Amino acid sequence: MSISLDTPVIQLPGVGEARSKKLEKLGLTRCGDLLAYYPRDYEDRRQMYTIRQAPLEGRVCIRAMAAEHPRKARIRKGLELVQLKVVDHTGALHLTFFNQGYVEKALRAGEEYIFFGTVEEQGRRRSMVNPIFERVGKQDFTVCIMPIYRLTAGISNHLLASLTRQCLPCAAQMADSLPPSVRQRYRLASSEFALQAIHFPPDEESLDLARRRLAFEELFYLSAGLTFLKGRRETLGAGCAIPTPPWDDFAALLPFQPTDAQRRVMKEVAFDMASGRPMNRLVQGDVGSGKTAVAAYAAFLSARAGYQTALMAPTEVLAEQHYRSLSALLAPAGIRVGLLTGALTPKEKRGLHQALAEGTIDLAVGTQALLSQGVSFHRLALIVADEQHRFGVAQRAALAGKSETGGMPPPHVLVMSATPIPRTLALIIYGDLDVSVIDQLPPGRTPVETYVVREDKRQRMYNFVRRQVAEGRQVYIVCPAVEENPDAALPGEESPALNLKAVKTYAQQLQTQVFPELTVGVLHGKMRPREKEAVMAAFGRGDIQVLVSTTVIEVGVDVPNASLMIVENADRFGLSQLHQLRGRVGRGKHQSYCVLITATRNVEAMGRLRTLASTTDGFRISEEDLKLRGPGDFFGNRQHGLPQMKLADLTGDMRLLRQAQQAARELLEEDPTLSRVENAPVRERVRRLFADTPDIFN
Ligand code: ADP
Ligand code: MG
């Protein structure tokens, strides 16, 4: 059978209905997909041992001869053994295969094989259970560098490796997506070589060449795509030129003196908005650095000039809070603020839509609901996206499209994020954004004291909660799960997670058994928007003293009177996430605390928690997080709204990133629309990488 890139995997030998379904789960439907499914790791099986010298640690290759015919025995129903002895010049090795009856015929006395498995030793007798074996001279998966793939239930690594091996010849059919001139200039391997070597590298050098080529191409498409986004913005034409009123007009509204950093960023924003070009700015600032004031200032400028602003938050809870604080701040200036969330009744919703369309609301605060059809604005000039890491590039594009109706110029876009990434990196990857950093916290903040504690301190911790409440403070308790569900195993875990504190049951238990004298509230994502609002409002007013919650309060929530954050099963959370959670306290004038409870015995997990306890510097924490989790995870879950990279390390290899950027720039100078025939593969790859932004080439 001849295989092409488009051959469905089901046509490969050994793949039936069931397996093809499972492969589909991994995104593997055609042979070309298998080639594009790079290994996550490799196992070096090149070292060969004699039976006597083979170490007892790890799996090893041994070359030996079958000294006898395999013996098959049926121990009981469902348990069949095949056993035999193999030998080399140093000794004998006893092999046992469980439930692999075919081995009886597959191994022939007198033939030489490579056996790959773990050697065990009792006295001087050496043995191996269920080794992989191949005839000498016919090795595919022994005495090699073996690829290790991400798997799913029912698909073994061996199967995936052998399927991929069968598809390797089609690597030659794939048109090289990098132009020859680029390959030459940056000394990159051909696509055919790279694909073969990334799966089955003959040696380390080849693997390095393959990796470099494939990482380069990812960065190249990323850069090209970002250049298109940026170019599209430049062709947007003029934006509304919004004049900057005297600073004191806004300063008079603020209940505090802005920090120098806030003031600097506000100036940058005002400058952008007055420039007559559409602003597209990212404001990065650690939790608590006061990003909301910057958003308020931008909305103020827009309203002053008679325009509307849409402010989007990632959660209902946050939208509701922004609504309350921004109305309080801006109402004295006569600015009309409206809230659009899923909690509105159809009638309220219609009323609000009408007000937005007629222009009787100046600032609309909401969630994704602001993006929905049916919402149109009268004179929309500014879009603010808070906590941007939850918004994708595509959503930004959709929002920007909002104003194109109604003959308004393209809107200014202000994006705010607390997820810190090193500035140089931000400038590169957010190729289509300008970046401001608020690198200073408001004065008078004492850093949150953070403690890692074990279960045995639980009672002391509850006492601490009582003392804080007695002093008039409020407390968050965050848990990883909503309901106690003993059958639900967490991702990456075999046994059900029985000891996870589940929000509902735990809140009930706290209220009835631990804090009967206090008011305990519950908040989680599965509640209806109205209920969530009511709970947050009650907590904001101080009617609830202890709020038991899931991570719905992770971003943005601001209740300055809360001084204690307790995180249950803290080892379940990522470092950056814990830092975000901790940012919910220490927002007022009171000394604040964060208690991380864990029962983990895992040394690494403890190390992570200690890191968090030792610093409050968001940049350091995110760097640490990057190191621990790897950029795949960090960027993989689209925290930054960027396309996913398979191989390229956006934080590690700045040099490769720069080269790829330069190469993309040069290519686009020659062929700005990528419409030349020879650049069709590049265009196709950019389109695929930016599948979230369907109109990338428009
Ligand atoms: P974040 O950057 O996390 O969004 P917020 O905008 O929610 O931070 O601000 C955190 C808290 O600090 C709020 O209670 C806010 O009112 C207060 N705040 C912001 N700027 C200042 C300042 N310059 N001086 C004093 N308090 C401030
Ligand atoms: Mg915020």
Image (spheres, rainbow, N blue to C red):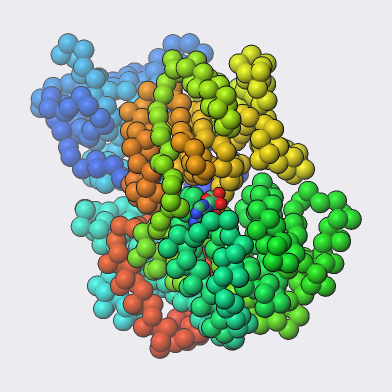
Question: Which of these two is toward me, 290 or 66?
Answer: 290
Task: Left or right? Give the position of 489 relative to 175.
Answer: right
**Residue under the point 44% across and 45% down:** 445
Task: Left or right? Give the position of 55 relative to 141.
Answer: left
Residue 243: x percent and y percent? 60, 81
Residue 615: x percent and y percent? 35, 41
Task: Left or right? Give the position of 401 relative to 441.
Answer: right
Question: Which of these two is toward me, 600 or 476?
Answer: 476
The number of numbered badges drawn on the structure is 0
Task: Left or right? Give the position of 23 relative to 36.
Answer: right
| 5 versus 239 height, above or below | above
Residue 75: x percent and y percent? 44, 11
**Residue under the point 40% across and 68% down:** 427
Question: Which of these two is toward me, 438 or 690?
Answer: 438
Rendered image quadrant of residue 53? top left
**Residue under the point 85% across and 51% down:** 345
**Residue under the point 52% across and 48% down:** 26
Rendered image quadrant of residue 682? bottom left
| 367 versus 96 height, above or below | below
**Quadrant position of the C terminus in the picture:** bottom right
| 484 versus 76 height, above or below | below
